[in-house]
Image: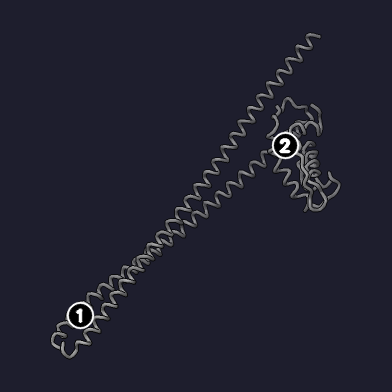
């Protein structure tokens, strides 16, 4: 294997790109400069890329360098992983640096995902607290309505007593006050209808609130389950990637062993 940039390029396959930066600096130029810096064992930063390019705006280079970092893991995953002891001494530092950079990026992504999950859990707790508060309000409202209904029933009972008394009085004064009795009965019927209407409206309002709170609770529970499933899926994907790297490493070791054995046989033949 050759030394310098050629050696590192064997581990990080260049990705052909066509997009240009908004101020003249091309993405492929930033990718090439970052690869050269990484081959030297240096972490590609905005200032180092500017020096490698011989100029350029930091505001232009920064997002393009982010693209390079985002594509770095995919480029590394597409090739076999070499054994450190098999590398020439002048490439070991660059390779270790590349591994450390990839590990740092992966850890940072995991920390960000965990932070997002914690934020989601905090929001869920807040939503649950708000739901509990609303349930308390609902209980208080229900108690107030029940109290009002009780008072209404008591008033109705009292009114019925008064009506019975009025009937006795009306029996004595039927001839003179028959018209007043009809009006009183009509007023009583109207009040009963009003009370029944209020009771039905209160019952509907309570039922609507129950349905709304139930749907909100189910939505929050579904969102928490979705967050947990996504996190577990990403953890499983990371495990699969690790297994794939181990397989590729074993293949590379076997190939290097075969090359060594063939070289030994060739030397003995000559």
Place residue 74 in its image quadrant.
top right
Is residue 206 shown left or right of residue 31? left
Q: Quadrant of the C terminus?
A: top right
| Foreground pick, 79 / 62 | 79
CB-based contact (under 8 Å), mark 1 and mark 2: no
Give the vertical position of 74 relative to 266 (above or below): below
Image mark count: 2
**Front residue (pair 226, 98):** 226
Residue found at x 43% / y 61%: 133
Q: Where's residue 181, x and y in %? A: 21, 84
Determine the secondary structure under disc 2.
helix
CA distance separating discs 1 and 2: 95 Å
Indicate left or right for 23 with 131 as reference: right
Q: Quadrant of residue 82?
A: top right
Q: Which residue is found at the position 58% from the left and 49% from the top?
A: 115
Q: Identify residue for label 1.
A: 163
Category of crowding for the residue at label 2, using alpha-carbon neighbours closer than 10 angstroms: few (below 14), some (14–19), many (at least 20): many
Residue at (71% x, 37% y) in the render: 75
Q: Position of residue 12 (x, y in %)?
A: 74, 35
Identify the residue at the far right of this view: 54
Mark drawn on residue 224: none
Q: Earlier in the sequence, mark 1 or mark 2?
A: 2
In screen coordinates, is 121 left or right of 82? left
Residue at image point 49% right, 57% down: 127
Q: Which residue is mark 2?
A: 98
With respect to residue 142, does 159 lie above or below? below
Q: Looking at the image, which residue sits at the far top?
A: 269
């Amino acid at each position: 294997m050759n030394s310098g940039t050629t050696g590192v390029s064997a581990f990080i396959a260049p990705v052909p790109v066509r997009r240009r930066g908004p101020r003249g600096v091309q993405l492929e130029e930033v990718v090439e400069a970052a690869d050269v810096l990484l081959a030297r064992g240096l972490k590609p930063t905005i200032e180092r890329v500017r020096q490698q390019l011989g100029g350029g705006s930091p505001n232009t280079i920064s997002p393009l360098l982010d693209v390079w970092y985002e594509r770095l893991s995919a480029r590394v995953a597409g090739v076999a992983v070499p054994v450190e002891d098999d590398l020439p001494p002048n490439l070991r530092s660059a390779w270790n640096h590349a591994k450390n950079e990839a590990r740092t990026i992966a850890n940072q992504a995991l920390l960000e995902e965990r932070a997002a999950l914690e934020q989601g859990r905090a929001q869920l707790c807040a939503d649950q607290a708000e739901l509990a508060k609303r349930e308390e309000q609902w209980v208080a409202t229900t108690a107030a309505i029940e109290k009002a209904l009780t008072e209404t029933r008591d008033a109705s009972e009292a009114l019925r007593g008064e009506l019975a008394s009025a009937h006795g009085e009306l029996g004595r004064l039927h001839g003179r006050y028959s018209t007043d009795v009809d009006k009183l009965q009509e007023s009583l019927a109207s009040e009963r209808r009003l009370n029944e209407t209020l009771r039905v409206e209160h019952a509907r309002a309570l039922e609507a609130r129950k349905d709304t709170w139930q749907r909100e609770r189910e939505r929050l529970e579904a969102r928490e389950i979705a967050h947990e499933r996504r996190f577990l899926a990403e953890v499983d994907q990371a495990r699969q990637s690790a297994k794939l790297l181990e397989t590729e490493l074993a293949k590379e070791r076997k190939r290097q062993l075969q090359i060594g054995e063939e070289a030994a046989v060739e030397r003995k033949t000559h």
